[in-house]
Amino acid sequence: MSRRLPWGAMGRMTGRRILSAVPVLLAVTFGVFAVAAASPFDPVKAYAGTAGLTASQADLDQLRANLGVDQPLVRRWWDWLSSALTGDLGDSSVLRQPVADVIAERIGWSALLATAAFAIAVLLGTALGVLAARRRGGWLDRCVSSAAYTLEAAPAFWLGLLAIWFFALELGALPAGGLTDTASDTVTPGQVISHLVLPAGVLGLSQLPWFFLYVRQGVGDALDEDPVRGARARGLAERTVLTGHALRSGMLPMLTLIGSRVPELITGALLVETVFSWPGIAAATVQAATSVDFPLLAALTVLATAAVLLGNLLSDLLYGLADPRVGFDG
């Protein structure tokens, strides 16, 4: 019997998630303005820089009014939200350009780094997990499992510094950071790829242990189930048993991991971008936080929150497609 894809149920689930995301995003943006308002950093002094040290109080008050930071918290939040709903994200006070331009210039590079790292973590973690599950307790399982537990405890920035020391300084095989070579004033695909290897590899390795451990456990348990034993008893090839029976059910737990790893991926990306001077949104996020740049900080936080919500939705949709027993209407 052919199986039809439940597009209607998927659409209903997606619609419910979008509706539930609205209050979450509203609460997050308000929280950003509330935390920024309670911050000891003065956005006016950050904007004025060294000129603020000699400026008169009247000039500082006028600048405060021009930036809109003299308004009450709720008023600042509502003004920003009203403009954002019309597509105007405001101007960054620290970078001196529209917030939309700040994000547009950097989001592509951050997305490239995160996508490459996620692909490394999923593909390599899945492959190693399947190999380890086939011979649980063997030398490969013991070696990779030990390395995975070690990587779990290793901060991404520490892995980044270690990679720079070994591959860039000791071996001289890969560039230590940036997007292009020092003497180059143009961005070429070859330079981008060579500069992407280290940050994407480090970020991918920092996420790999969870995918490896989930796949190892899921596929290992599936290989011990009665249907798989029956398939082996009927004389089916080991590859057929693995790909046709154990791999499908054993991979289901890993699908739920995709959404839950998005927050860690975003946090790790910020650290890795900083270590490798990757021109993503990390530098803008740090500057927005330390300078209490309300519009930029709110926009970046909304972007990160939306990515987390989309990751959770994606994992649920994939799980529902892979296992029809779960469904989409629960």
Image (tube, rainbow, N blue to C red):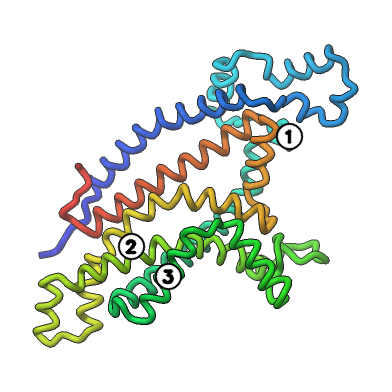
**234 on left or right of 107:** left
Nearest to the eye among marks 1 and 2: give it: 2
Residue at position x 65%, y 62% in the image: 161
Identified by mark 1, the residue type is: Val
**Secondary structure beneath label 3:** helix
Secondary structure at badge 1 equals loop
> Marks 1 and 3, Cα distance to the nearest angstrom?
45 Å
Is the C-beta separation of discs 2 and 3 under 8 Å? no
Q: Observer-nearest residue: 109 or 268?
A: 268
Left or right: 290, with 247 as reference point: right
Count the labels in the image.
3
Which of the 4 image quadrants contains residue 191?
bottom right
Badge 2: how crowded within 10 Å, few (<14), some, or many (20+)?
Answer: many
Amino acid of disc 2: Tyr
User: Residue 19 occupies which quadrant of the picture?
Assistant: top left
| 131 vs 284, nearest the viewer | 131
Q: Are marks 1 and 2 in contact (CB under 8 Å)?
A: no
Q: Nearer the viewer, mark 1 or mark 3?
A: 3
Residue most extreme to the right: 54
Does 211 sit above or below residue 237?
above
Residue pointed to by mark 2 = 214
Which quadrant of the figure contains the N terminus?
A: bottom left
The residue indicated by pointer 3 is: 146
* Residue name at image x 48 percent, y 50 percent: 264
Q: Give the mark, 2 or 3, whose residue is nearer the N terminus.
A: 3
How far across and how far down the image is residue 310, in percent? 41, 45
Judged left or right of residue 233, residue 21 is right
What residue is disc 1 on? 94
Q: Earlier in the sequence, mark 1 or mark 3?
A: 1
Residue 197: give x, y in percent of width and height.
61, 68
